[in-house]
Image (cartoon, rainbow, N blue to C red):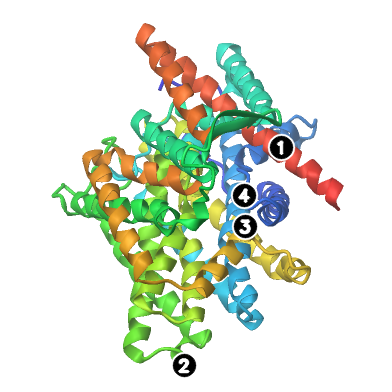
Amino acid sequence: MEEKNLSGLNITAKEHPKWYEPASLIFATLMCILGTIIGMELIVATGTTPNTSLVGALFAIVFSRIPLSVCKKFRSIHRQNLIQTSISGATFSVANCMLLTIGIPVVMGYPELMVPMLIGCTLATIIDASILYKCFDTPMFPAEGAWPPGVACAETLLAVIEKGKKAFGIIIGMLMGAVGKAAGIPMDLLGVSWFGNFWAMMALGIGSIIIGVIKTNAFSFALFSFNFNFVDGIFGENFVYSDYISLNYLPHGIMVGAGIVSLIQCGIMLMKKSDGNTSAAGQFTSSMKNMKGALGIGFGAYAVVAMVLAVVCGLLTDMSIPMFILWVLFAAFAALASELIVGISAMHSGWFPGFATALIFLIVGMLIGFPPLALGILAGYTAATGPCFSDMAYDLKCGYMLRGEGKDPELEKVGRQQQFYAELFGFAVAFVMALLFANKYFDQGMFVAVSNTYKSTIEAGTSMEVAKWLLIWAVPGAVIQWLGGHKQIGILFATGLLVGSTINGITILVALLIRYIAVKRNPENEATLTILGAGALAGSALYSFFTATLGLVKRN
């Protein structure tokens, strides 16, 4: 990354703004409330959550231009970073970790468990973010990793200050992102493909195309609401994807195999001898020794919260003591494993298969033989970990770039700590908003679609046939992950199979081809593609934000 020596960026650790400053706290509260409203509305309406971090930062930029002394404070790019961290944490946590998870016991017929579930999953979310805080910028989760949404946010904020060529590139990229998104092209994936890990993104693209073709029995996609059908009936005219249990569990089996190998790779990395104090970047940040300690304490914390949650929810009456202990340990393991797998995927691609990963652990829990309510609590508890692990990492990546990429270790330490507190503040606002408004949605029958998916999966039950295909597909998943080394090809390939589509895969592969040709002709083009890609990702996010908000207004 090029040298940053810009007015307004070079501050000392003592000069870094604090998250609790009155003006910042008031503005952050308003932004968090806005973020939670957007998050709850969209996850119920569409099943997705927009990245509002850039939106919060842009609001701060606009606010700073108001000719009042209190407003001028928000011209500080580091204060903007704290605002975007708070709103992003609030948005993702209220939607993915709260509204979704507390809806599971409600749809299963246990509305009295909503509040205990909310408290338990909020604590799991805090543990999740705390582990990431200790793990960020270690060899496993380096600050120099891709973390695409974080790069997009940082480049956009820097472009506002730098102006000139970089600002022009960001604007062009944002226009590309908005127009492409309107056409039905996943421009966020196109942008990520221009600066994310090349091989990991290729695996994501291939997996997306494969599952898209299998599900539709065709090679087709839509642009501007017009369908382009190149090949129909690939597997025969009467082929229906849902009729084949072997194909239904293909993505899950691949992820199980890749996930197991990925966890083994993580374990090997953790067990490697080191001096205990250095990170991948050779800077102060976090050591592998600290990460080991964080994971150990995190597992214990997850187990304690899971045990209390299980007791409060009455799981002891449904299970024997040995089964209860097994459930607690499995829930803690699932929470920890889920956040590592989801975090690795997010680092390389900007995508995190949080819901899908929780579904996999739910299926494994079904095979173990846990009763229905225990499975529902397990699914929600697992789903609460991972999304904010990834989201906070994006925010820390943004702050890392704005603070000079670790050149001043003390500034980086202080800035990262302030971001952590800002993230926790966002969680607090999200908790209050979920407590106040969740029943408003549930009373109208408005639940997150994934909550019903978990319920229907539990009701459908599982069988040895399912176990057989999970094991069969786990083998190639494990092989792909192992051969890919630490590029996480298996995880990203499985992610594509779980949440991808044909248009997603085509977009990724075309973008990678453009990247390959451009960089081959001139290596300096890589920097240009990074800026354009960041702009495309930002433009796509802003387009989704404003169109979704307009849709919200129309609906109400």
Q: Position of residue 230 (x, y in %)?
A: 55, 27
Q: Quadrant of residue 450?
A: bottom right
Helix, strand or loop for disc 4: loop
Residue type at the position of mark 2: Thr
Residue type at the position of mark 3: Ala
Q: Which residue is mark 4?
A: 48
Mark toward the start of the polypeptide (4 vs 2): 4
Q: CA distance from mark 4 to mark 3?
A: 9 Å
Q: Which of label 4 and label 3 is nearer to you?
A: 4
The front one of 181 and 284 is 181
Please tell me which residue is depicted at 59% across the width and 32% down the height of the picture. Answer: 221
Q: Quadrant of residue 139?
A: top left
Helix, strand or loop for disc 1: helix
Mark toward the start of the polypeptide (3 vs 1): 1
Residue type at the position of mark 1: Phe
Residue furthest top in the image: 521
Q: CA distance from mark 2 to mark 3?
A: 31 Å
Q: CA distance from mark 2 to mark 1?
A: 51 Å
Q: CA distance from mark 4 to mark 2?
A: 36 Å
Q: Which residue is mark 3?
A: 95
Q: Which residue is mark 2?
A: 317
Q: Which of label 2 and label 3 is nearer to you?
A: 2
